[in-house]
Image (cartoon, coloured by chain):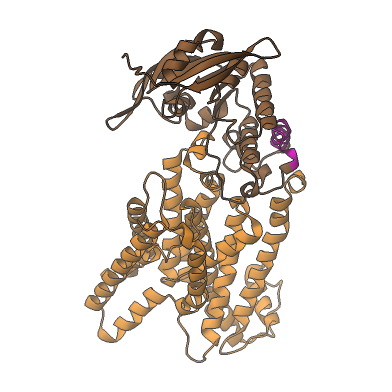
Chain colours: A orange, B brown
């Protein structure tokens, strides 16, 4: 390809980075399906998965026990799928927000967007809508995320610039408010013994008891969101150079910004609808990848999707296996990685704060 | 392509940034906008570029109102080089210049061989080909500006608007940049630029428009317009003309008393 020859770094990144991440994702997925309270050999995992995606009779499953098949296909695979989808969505959404706000600290859970999505999800949960039809949950989560994002954006952005301090403070306040309302709604509506459980699920995230229904539930908004992200890839690059430059190169700045925000909200909403608030995925993954692959979103967005998926699968694997038979909440594991990383970024950015 | 402002004014709140400016930027000509700081040079450039819409009057490209063209259509026809080129994102120079192809690419298109060729030619013409794989944020101010000029060449637009394109450049690259703009204009491009250095204007511009306090004071050829009285009145300096080797004169400025120049 001429492109690879003409663009050394971009070519390098595309032809080495992305396949590497894809392999990493595949390995993580198989490992996560194999490891657990009951171990399944990885060869069995591969066989069961292969049998499911290939026509009948191509893969012989006679030697695989019924129990193993159930564990692999009905228990662990959907869970790993949901982890991959949510992680990929958060990776993309985080990348978009960092690009749009031109700040590596912008991330769905840090600036209150995930909490807004969780509030939307909780509304369907307590009102019974989520039981009525499967699409209400992701739809309301999307609405919650969008409302939160629009609010933070309106408060924190002046004339196209978003001071870090304002962004973080607005996000913290909004996140806390959304969390409080969610907790209140849960307390008012479900029986006592469930309250703590539900609040913990939505606020700290989790992938326990995920089924194929959850996979299908979040897939359409995710696909739509990913398509939207791809649609505005180059615009995001141009916006990194400043609004005026972007406009002079043909970007309809306001409209594009609104569309990117909507896309990010849709992705965040879909992720939160099936996994609760999982922090920092959209912070660590895009930032690390940007250091290696460069700022061009043509590479960065798919890389963040693959990387986010792999990262969340591994975090969930840790959450399940660190302290058996108890499961640690997934949000705790991601926070264990993410919070120190966030502090490190904050320290490095100190000079750029505008706290006036 | 000919760009024209007709009685254009821009008001933000109660403040008039420019008022009743009529200028024509013609193809094949280098048009300079001069004036003291805050006179409205950058504003006029942005009105010409269609980045800002005049609140009064009209801006048009070959008779078509700029407001009727989409951003994309504008970007295909007019390129704008801002004064501030502070870029803190580690794009390579080649990536930066390739962004000039954005208005010509479809949503899912990757840049093709033709685009790569235009980018390579733009890199060479702006003398940044040797920097193609360096990171933009690690370049000097002058190198960065040339990279941005290369990006606007890569758009392939026939109208180039530049805000102080020679600021921060060493003298060699000042001359090189001006020569490049001259060559482009001679090939039929429409070039307009905001400039500070009146000597550069006198030597390189075909047309000059003098702005003061958001008003157009005078327009025409530099020889006609930049007489001692006007320079004294607009800039508040006294002019001395020294004969240069090529038979033209070089302007030397001395601080004078700034006179009131507002006459409506």
Query: Up-down: is B32 above or below A43?
Result: above
Q: Is residue B121 magenta?
A: yes
Residue B5 in the image: x percent, y percent? 43, 17
| Residue at the far top in the pictured view | B224
Image check: B240 left or right of A190? right
Name which residue lies at 64% across and 16% down: B188
Viewer-closest of A107 and A73:
A107
Residue A60 figure quarter = bottom right
Left or right: B257, with A18 as reference point: left
Residue closest to the far bottom: A325
- The image shows residue B177 at horizontal and vertical percentages of 66, 28
Q: Is residue A247 left or right of residue B201?
A: left
Q: Magenta residues: mostly which secondary structure?
A: helix
Compared with residue A285, is residue A354 higher up or lower down, i.e. above or below? above
Residue at the image point whose x is 64% and y is 76% from the top: A30
Indicate the quadrant containing the C terminus of chain B: top left, top right, bottom left or bottom right.
top left
Q: Is residue B231 magenta?
A: no
Camera-side residue of A229 and B157: B157
Could you say which quadrant of the image residue A202 lies in? bottom left
**In the shown orientation, is residue A335 left or right of residue B155?**
left
The answer to whether A212 is drawn above or below residue B226 in the figure is below
Question: In the rendering, at what x and y percent does residue B87 appear?
Answer: 56, 46
Give the magenta range.
B114-130
- At a point 55% along the width and 15% down the height, the residue shown is B240
Residue A86 seen in the figure: no
> Which quadrant, please, contains the N terminus of chain B?
top right
Q: Quadrant of residue B80?
A: top right
Any part of residue B249 in sight:
yes
Q: Position of residue A47 (x, y in %)?
A: 68, 77
């Amino acid at each position: 390809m001429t492109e690879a020859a003409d663009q050394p770094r971009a070519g390098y990144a595309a032809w080495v980075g992305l396949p590497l991440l894809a392999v990493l994702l595949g390995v993580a997925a198989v490992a996560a399906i194999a490891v657990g309270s009951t171990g399944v050999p990885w060869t069995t995992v591969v066989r069961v998965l292969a049998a499911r995606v290939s026509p009948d009779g191509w893969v012989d499953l006679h030697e695989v026990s019924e129990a193993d098949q159930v564990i692999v296909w009905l228990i662990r695979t959907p869970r790993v799928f949901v982890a991959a989808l949510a992680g990929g969505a958060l990776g993309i959404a985080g990348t978009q927000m960092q690009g749009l706000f031109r700040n590596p600290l912008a991330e769905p859970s840090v600036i209150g967007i995930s909490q807004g999505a969780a509030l939307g999800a909780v509304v369907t949960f307590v009102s019974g809508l989520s039981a009525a039809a499967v699409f209400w949950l992701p739809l309301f989560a999307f609405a919650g995320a969008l409302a939160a994002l629009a609010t933070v954006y309106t408060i924190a952005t002046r004339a196209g610039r978003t001071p870090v301090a304002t962004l973080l403070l607005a996000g913290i306040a909004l996140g806390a408010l959304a969390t409080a309302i969610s907790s209140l709604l849960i307390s008012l509506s479900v029986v006592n013994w469930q309250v703590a459980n539900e609040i913990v699920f939505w606020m700290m995230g989790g992938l326990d008891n995920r089924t194929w229904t959850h996979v299908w539930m979040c897939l359409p908004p995710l696909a739509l969101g990913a398509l939207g992200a791809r649609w505005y890839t180059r615009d995001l690059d141009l916006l990194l150079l400043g609004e005026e430059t972007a406009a002079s190169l043909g970007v309809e700045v306001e409209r594009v910004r609104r569309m990117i925000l909507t896309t990010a909200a849709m992705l965040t909403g879909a992720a939160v609808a099936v996994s609760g608030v999982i922090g920092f995925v959209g912070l660590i993954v895009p930032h690390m990848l940007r250091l290696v692959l460069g700022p061009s979103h043509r590479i960065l967005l798919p890389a963040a999707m693959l990387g986010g998926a792999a990262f969340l699968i591994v975090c969930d694997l840790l959450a399940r296996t660190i302290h058996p038979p108890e499961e640690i909440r997934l949000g705790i594991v991601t926070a264990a990685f993410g919070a120190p990383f966030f502090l490190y970024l904050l320290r490095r950015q100190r000079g750029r704060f505008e706290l006036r | 392509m000919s760009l024209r402002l007709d009685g254009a004014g821009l008001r933000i709140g109660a403040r008039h940034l420019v008022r009743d400016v009529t200028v024509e930027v013609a193809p094949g000509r280098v048009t300079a906008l001069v004036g003291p700081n805050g006179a409205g040079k950058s504003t006029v450039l942005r009105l010409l570029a269609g980045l800002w819409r005049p609140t009064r009057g009209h801006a048009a490209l070959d008779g078509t109102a700029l407001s009727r063209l989409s951003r994309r259509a504008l970007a295909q026809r007019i390129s704008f080089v801002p004064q501030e080129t502070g870029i803190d994102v580690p794009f390579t120079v080649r990536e930066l210049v390739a962004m000039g192809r954005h208005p010509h690419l479809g949503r899912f298109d990757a840049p093709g061989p033709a685009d790569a060729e235009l980018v390579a030619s733009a890199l060479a013409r702006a003398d940044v080909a040797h920097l193609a794989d360096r990171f933009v944020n690690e370049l000097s101010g002058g190198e960065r500006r040339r990279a941005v000029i290369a990006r606007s060449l890569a758009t392939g637009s026939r109208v180039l608007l530049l805000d102080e394109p020679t600021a921060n450049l060493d003298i060699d690259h000042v001359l090189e940049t001006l020569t490049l703009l001259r060559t482009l204009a001679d090939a039929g491009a429409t070039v307009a630029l905001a400039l500070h250095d009146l000597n550069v204007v006198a030597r390189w511009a075909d047309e000059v428009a003098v702005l003061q306090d958001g008003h157009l004071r005078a327009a025409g050829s530099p020889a006609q317009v930049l007489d001692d009285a006007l320079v004294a009145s607009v800039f508040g300096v006294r002019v001395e003309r020294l004969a240069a080797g090529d038979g033209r004169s070089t302007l030397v400025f001395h601080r004078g008393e700034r006179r009131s120049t507002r006459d409506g």
